[in-house]
Amino acid sequence: MTDAPDVGAQLDAAVTQNAAFSKTGLLERTFARLFHGLVYAQIWEDPVVDMAALDLGPKDHVVCIASGSCNLLSYLAVSPASITAVDLSPAHVMLGKLKLATVRTAPDHHTLYNMLGKANMYGNIKTFDEIIAADLDPEVRDYWNTWTPTGRRINMFARGLHRHGLLGRFLGVIRFVSMIARVDYKPLLEARTLDEQAAFFEANIVPLYNSRIIRWIANQRASLFGLGIPPAQYDKLAADADGDIVAVLEERTRKLVCDFPVKENYFLWQATTRGYDRSADAAVPPYLEPQHFETVKANADRVTLVNRSLTDVLAEVPAGSKTAYVFLDAQDWMTDDQLNALWQEVTRTAAPDARVIFRTGGADDILPGRVDDKILSRWAYQPEASAKGFANDRSAIYGGFHVYHFKG
């Protein structure tokens, strides 16, 4: 299963739904250009929720979107039989292949955590040169050795990986705005109870959302490009509050800040510090937890990671061979034709006990009325599992979490 040569055109097609010189069309094409580069250094979907919703285990053959690759690596902690990961962003694929090589070659958890957890130490360059580089395909090795205006690309692991990419820069802007508004996140990160977190939110975050400048910025459709949200998904977000995107963003931020203890939510740490909690018992993605080091390392060769579209990859997969599908929020970007093409292949490749999970920017399930009923009727929506997954998703940025089981 090789990378497709026309993946750039596929990425453009995935995002662009309007005339090139219309206002929305120009925004879509700008977003598509940005997505050719690194967007997510860390994925923003909760892998613990994913694994629970899928009841993931050793018999599973998983198909997923790579994004920042934290989730596919975390799935290895439960030893699935195989993982096929795809992404239309070439930068995401290069990052994922580097992370996989790091997992395979790191001699101990300390080395792994310095490289991918702290991801801001000068010694990581030596680790790359002396340990990881030899495990990489020449194309991937050349990508990370390429010189940029700030030095070799691999240097981002010395300067702070999580500060890079579209999301990292976006969070940097948020941090700068917070400093201007004199919001200090230290009391939040030291909070001992959910009540203390809620009090911080009311005293510090709500006034930000009420400010004129924040409301103006949020109402610009390009303002959320930094979260990886294209115009079509922006509109779905706004629809949850009758067009008031600020109300939606405030509620999502409230969930992130208030619904989960700070010590258990590494997404909150990323949002406020662009890094993980440094304490010994800090919450991190499962693949970075020391108790999973040997298992994840042993299972790394079960992953195939390619720069292609989901639908194209599935078209080459034998019928009835896959049991678990993770679509993140990619379907929010799709036209009806693209959705139907995807679900036709999902249904063809699904094993009798297959499960699908995905997230949506808005609250509603986007499939009914759009995917042909002859296809969708073969799947059973799981309302209780969907509600549980949504409630437990610590990343808190989505409006809906959805689970389907294959009926055969």
Image (cartoon, helix red, strand yellow):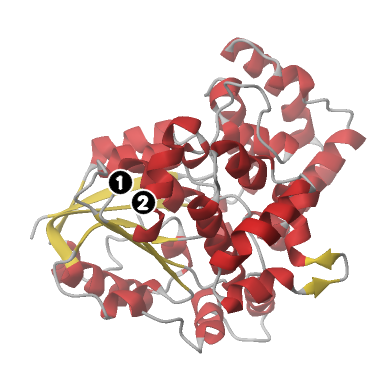
- x and y, in percent, of residue 327 in the image: 39, 59
Question: Which badge, 2 or 1, is on the more N-terminal residue?
Answer: 1
- x and y, in percent, of residue 90 in the image: 58, 73
In this view, the residue in front, 215 or 27, is: 27
Residue 369 relative to residue 245: left or right: left
Task: Tell me the quadrant of the picture where the C terminus can be found.
Answer: bottom left
Pointer 2: what residue?
A: 299
In this view, the residue in front, 248 or 274, is: 274
In this view, the residue in front, 376 or 313, is: 313
Crowding near pointer 2: few (<14 within 10 Å), some, many (20+)? Answer: many
In this view, the residue in front, 344 or 326, is: 326
Pointer 1: what residue?
A: 79
Location of residue 285 with respect to 404 vertically, above or below = above
- x and y, in percent, of residue 199 in the image: 68, 15
Residue 16 visible in image: yes
Residue sticking out furthest to the bottom: 5
